[in-house]
Amino acid sequence: MSAVAAGPLGGVKVLEVQGLGPGPFCGMILSDFGADVVRVERVENVTSETPPSAAVDVLSRGRRSVGVNLKSDEGVALVLKMVEQADVLIEGFRPGVMERLGLGPDVCLARNPRLVYGRVTGYGQEGPWASYAGHDINYIALSGALWSIGRDGEAPVPPLTYVGDFGGGGMFLALGVCAALTERAASGRGQVVDAAMIDGSATLNAFLYGMRAAGLWGEERGNNLLDTGTPYYEAYETADGKWIAVGAMEPKFFANLVAALGLDFDPSDQADEQTWTGLRADLAATFITRARDEWCKVLESAEACFAPVLSPWEAPNHPHHVARETFTESFGVVQPSPAPRFGRTPARIAGPPPQPGEHTETVLTEWGVAPEEIFRLKATGDVA
């Protein structure tokens, strides 16, 4: 793996203090964009038996890994020496942890005023809940995002960890880091990026506030335009136990859907809520008569805003994804290709996930640590 690779972030040096979920997701994005991302791994992760999953951990792709004892003075001093050369540091601990380690933003920015110090937490760095433990479901519950996901009369449905950890957390951290790097090009100064999953997931909900203000979104879940409240924005089961997703909101697309399915329904009645119960039943009764892929053949040329509901394991084989190379196989694992796409400085997968501490000697040598010093630090257990 090249330390400096092609991509819009080529030449940017990132230290990722090893964590879970949103931090690694951010690190993956920055690596895909061309940054040289070095993960600072706990020495116990290096010296213990490495779990088999480490070799196929897609979120860890494209990194190099060094093992450092962050609980020793020598280990912390080593990281601070690396901070002096880094462009970015990202971490995902609870508030105060990095400060207690001696690696908080004040210390790091004093060493390197150009450093972009990125932090991602659930509840943010301050506020009454800042120190509370939690997971994705808790953060998006507090932000209001979870409430909106689910059907009428049923409980909210946790959307895996897409909305909090990844969309509202790691993605916003990556965006914040890129924005701070852009600002630094003009000011010459780094800064702290505080990415809280409650903030990010609340921002993902922004469109609902506008729709509510316009009188287009009601109080009850599952009774609105995009939350299965309408029969023309819904998923319907097919004869083979699979599903078709319908999103025919606009009148012309809805009319095309009605025509393609051969429904006895006047498209001009689309907005009449009194017809929705019957329309939903008719759509369900129609879709259940054929297999999913048969319906695809019927609807593909109809401009009816439909799609087959593909599992993550089916999606890579869809002809559209194959043509666009949306997915790739790397280090023996089928996975999403880097996104978005750049016309001049393409993103890429820089390499497989590292084993903890796999690159300790190589990276430290590159970052100016003398071989005899590396030998001494390994002997004392400060690096591994």
Image: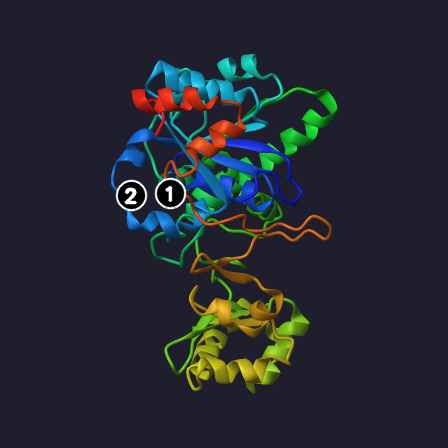
Q: Which corner quadrant of the image does residue 272 belong to?
A: bottom right
The C terminus - image quarter: top left
Q: Distance between the residues labelled 1 and 2?
A: 7 Å
**What is the total number of numbered labels drawn onto the structure image?**
2
Q: Earlier in the sequence, mark 1 or mark 2?
A: 2
Q: Which colour scheme is used?
A: rainbow
Q: Can residue 205 be seen in this view?
A: no
- State the residue position of label 2: 50
Q: Which residue is drawn at 61% across and 34% down?
A: 12
Give the image location of residue 254, x and y in percent: 61, 74
Task: Indicate which disc residue 355 carries.
Answer: 1
For this orientation, the residue located farthest to the left is: 49
* For residue 137, above or below residue 108: below
Q: Given the image, on which type of amino acid does mark 1 rest?
A: Gln
Give the image location of residue 152, x and y in percent: 40, 58
Q: Given the image, on which type of amino acid does mark 2 rest?
A: Thr
For this orientation, the residue located farthest to the front is: 372
Q: Is residue 357 visible?
A: yes
Where disc 1 sits, the SS reads loop
- Badge 2: residue crowd in 10 Å (few <14, some 14–19, many ≥20): few
